[in-house]
Image (tube, rainbow, N blue to C red):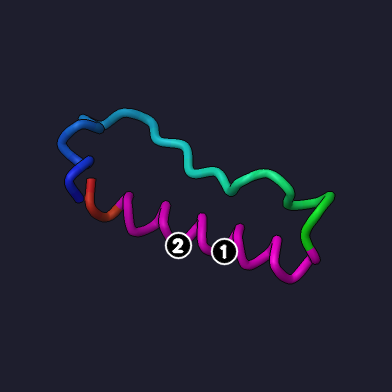
Amino acid sequence: QPMLPALKGETVYINPSCGLGDYLPREIAFQKLQLAATVADKLRRMI
């Protein structure tokens, strides 16, 4: 929340860290993508 005033309607990219396809088991990679989607949804509602 402290960062929200700095965004000022700018485009924000929520990206998982590297290693989704090459280094992580599929289940863990999918969980990381789900978390990124959840964070993006919450951020959209806050802006």
What residue span does the magenta drawing correspond to? 25-44
Image position, residue 22 (x, y; %)? 84, 50
Distance of label 1 from label 2 (alpha carbons): 6 Å
Name the residue type under label 1. Gln
Using residue 44 as the reference point, say whether residue 27 is left or right of it.
right
Answer few, some or many: residues within 10 Å of disc 2's Cα (few below 14, many 20 plus, some between 14 and 19).
Answer: few
* Residue under the point 81% across and 54% down: 23
What secondary structure characterizes most of the magenta part?
helix
Instruction: Decide whether residue 39 is among the magenta residues.
Output: yes
Q: Quarter of the image holding residue 38?
A: bottom left
Find disc 1 in the rendering and name its residue: 34
Instruction: Decide whether residue 20 is among the magenta residues.
Output: no
Find disc 2 in the rendering and name its residue: 38
* Residue under the point 74% across and 71% down: 27
The disc label shown at residue 13, or none: none
Label 2 element class? helix
Q: Are marks 1 and 2 in contact (CB under 8 Å)?
A: yes
